[in-house]
Each structure stands twice: as C-alpha cells, then as structure tokens.
Image (tube, rainbow, N blue to C red):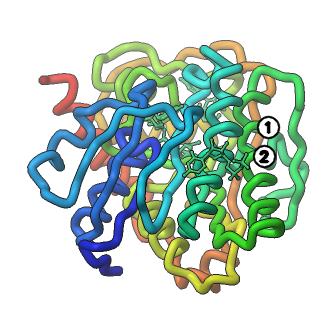
Amino acid sequence: MTYRDTQKVLVTGGAGFLGSHLCDRLVDAGADVLCLDNLYTGTKKNVAHLHDRTNFEFVRHDVTMPLYVEIDRIFNLACPASPIHYQYDPVQTTKTSVHGAINMLGLAKRLRARILQASTSEVYGDPEVHPQKEEYWGRVNPIGIRSCYDEGKRCAETLFFDYRRQHNLEIKVVRIFNTYGPRMNPHDGRVVSNFIVQALKGEDITIYGDGSQTRSFCYVDDLIEAMLRMMDTRADFTGPVNIGNPGEFTMLELAEKILSLVGSTSKIVYQPLPQDDPRQRQPDISLAKSELDWQPKVSLEDGLKETISYFKRLLQA
Ligand code: NAD
Ligand code: UDP
Ligand code: UDP
C-alpha cells in the first residue's frame, strides 16, 4: 500500500488504540492524515510521536457534530469499544455510532469519498452459530446493557448499506473481533489489559464467571493490515468482512498463559459474569482470506509478549 501525499485520509477515533496504529501505518505510507478524536477514551499520547511528521494533523472534534473538511478517504473508528466505557454514558454511545455514521456518510457523500466502517463481532450478539460467518444475522438483546454498543453498531451498518443503495457511495464494512496490543487503555477493563496489568502488579486475576467462555484474540498489527487491504478492495466489494484471529481460547486459558509469560504469582479469583456476556466467539475468516488475501500471522504468545512489554514500560513510567 502506498498513498500519495495529495491523498487526504480522515481517521475518526484516531487517538484511540486501533486508530493510532492505523495513523502510524498511513503516515508511513505517505498519506496526508487527519486524525480526529474527542479524546473520550483515546489520548494525545497515542499519537504524540506523529506530531513532527508534516503529513499528520490532529483535530479535537466529536463525530456527533457535523464536520466540513476536504478529504479523499474516511476510516470511521470513533466509538468507545470497551464495555466499561461504552456503558458509562450509553446514550452518547448510541449517538456516537448513529449520528457519527450519518455525519461521516454525509461527508463522504458530499466529497464522493470512499468510507470504511469499523464494525464489530458484537453485531452477532451471543451467537447460536459457531464460528460466525458474515451471513449470520446475530442474536442481540435490543434492551440490555450492551445494546447501546451492539445496536448502535448494527444501525451504523444499516446506514452504510442504505447510503450505498440510495446514494451509490463506496462503502467498506469490517467486523472486528477482539483485538489486543500496545496502547490498549489500561483502565478500560478489557480482559487482555486487565489480566496483564494484574499479573504485572501481583494483584488477583479477575475471571468473570467460571472462565469457560471463549474469545478469539487478534494482534493489532494483523488487524490494521486487514483494514488497509479492505480499504483498497475493488469498488463493488462492500463486505461486511470478519477480521480476527480464529484461535479460540477460554478466559481461564488466557489467564494461565499470561501468568506464565509474566512469571507472576498472582492468584486467580472468580467474580460474577456480567449480564449478556457472550458465551463464545470465533470468526470464520474465509471471506477475508479470499477477498483480502489476508490471514493473521502473529501467534497469541508472541502478541502477548509485545503487549506485556508495553504495559511493563507504562507501569514503570
Ligand atoms: P478506543 O476506545 O481505544 O478508541 C476509540 C476512539 O474513539 C477513542 O480515541 C475515543 O476518544 C474516540 N471517540 C469516542 N467517541 C467519540 C466521538 N463521539 N467523537 C470523536 N471521537 C470519539 O477503542 P479501539 O479498540 O481503538 O476501537 C476502535 C474502533 O474499533 C471502535 O469503533 C470499536 O467499536 C471498533 N472495534 C474494536 C475492537 C477491539 O477489540 N479493539 C473490536 C471490535 C470493534
Ligand atoms: N455532513 C457533514 N459534513 C459534510 C456533509 C454533511 O458533517 O460535508 C453531515 C450533516 O450534518 C448532515 C449529515 O452529514 O446532517 C448527513 O448528510 P446528508 O447529505 O446525507 O443528509 P442531509 O444533509 O440531507 O440531512
Ligand atoms: N473478562 C474477565 N475478566 C476481566 C475482564 C473481562 O473474565 O477482568 C471476561 C469478560 O467477562 C468476557 C471476556 O473476558 O467474557 C472478554 O471481555 P472483554 O471486555 O475484553 O471483551 P468483550 O466481552 O467485549 O468481548
């Protein structure tokens, strides 16, 4: 992938975990990057190293407000992603997904810009089909505590496809499965960051429920590569495409792996399972393999080592 410096790329949520890695790749590829973020869960520290690059610019803005800029491509990532953060102000979470999508689609429509939506495996809810394929419509509770996120993201997908049908926009939708790596927010309560920080500090490892629920974890570099490839696919390919690592682990297995990699003596404790917590999740990535010629390369063990080093540095700072 190479971008011309005349190609202006907007990354909403660009100061977040995934957005900042995407900005890194785009800046290195030579694009003129506009990183937009309201810094709700992201931080300027995530992109501080890019400020001396002439092809990088940061703007503090909320995607629920209209935005008039001139750009060629949009990666729409703005939205808190961890349950603690998206449940803190659920109305704002839905607004961010829905109003944010409308504004970014309106912007794309005015400029005839290609636009990619960072959707989520949460659109499948607590699935009764395993592993999940893109054709599966999902099993989502519309009125539960996760609904602001799940239904907000589902509605955003609807808007993307209606803007395509109604206004012939070039849209791309990726459904991201659990992703981890450096620059995860240590306070956002996600399982990988929680377990690593707890193991490094010698605190109890908090498993919710009995630890038999499963997740599939993708390392951030693999994920960003797939997003970039998706943006470059032929005009009539819209997705949705699952992106994730099909390796499936129970939370107990994850805890044990992290304890052994950190060499920690923390003990495992069991706490109540949050409401509507999906039992299992694993992507079927055949579509990504065939359309993007992509599959994850980083093993859970290697990815965790990188992430552990990051959190070690963060805790020492
Ligand atoms: P994150 O919380 O680190 O990043 C989200 C960014 O969006 C933050 O920088 C936040 O400040 C910003 N933001 C939130 N509301 C905003 C608003 N109204 N206006 C402007 N900026 C706003 O989370 P992440 O893990 O980097 O997730 C990025 C995107 O990928 C999200 O859309 C998320 O739903 C999606 N996703 C992530 C995962 C994952 O495992 N990390 C899985 C599925 C989907
Ligand atoms: N919008 C924006 N930037 C633009 C164009 C539109 O933020 O460059 C927003 C604007 O707030 C509008 C929304 O996108 O409400 C949807 O735009 P669209 O043109 O689809 O709908 P309309 O303006 O007709 O409601
Ligand atoms: N989880 C856990 N301990 C923690 C944090 C999370 O056991 O300290 C569990 C959580 O209940 C869920 C899984 O780990 O079953 C993944 O949680 P996360 O919030 O990272 O992602 P999501 O539920 O959105 O997939």
- Indicate the position of residue 39 as horizontal and vertical percent values: 39, 28
Determine which residue is flagged by label 2. 154
Closer to the camera in the image, 50 or 66? 66
The residue at label 2 has a CB less than 8 Å from ligand 1: no
Q: Where does the C terminus fall, quadrant-wise?
A: top left
- Report the quarter where the N terminus lies: bottom left
Instruction: Find the residue positioned furthest to the left.
Output: 52
Residue 233 seen in the current view: yes
Give the amino acid at mark 1.
Glu
Is residue 314 positioned above or below 49 on the image? above
Please, is residue 262 above or below residue 101 in the view?
above
Q: Residues within 10 Å of mark 1 (few under 14, many from 20)?
A: many
Looking at the image, which residue is at 70% across and 22% down?
A: 209
State yes or no: discs 2 and 1 in contact (Cβ < 8 Å). Answer: yes
What residue is at 42 percent from the left and 69 percent from the top? 225
Check disc 2: other Cα within 10 Å, few if <14, some if 14-19, many if 20+.
many
Determine the CA span between mark 2 and mark 1.
5 Å
In the image, taking residue 314 as reference, residue 308 lies left or right, namely right
* Residue 167: image location, x then y, percent: 75, 67
Which residue is rendered at x = 46% and y = 46% of the image? 12
Label 1 sits on residue: 151
Residue 273, x across and y down, in percent: 72, 20
Residue 245 placement: quadrant: bottom right
Disc 1 element: helix
Residue 235: x and y in percent read 63, 83
Image: 169 above or below 51: below
* Callout 1: CB less than 8 Å from ligand 1: no
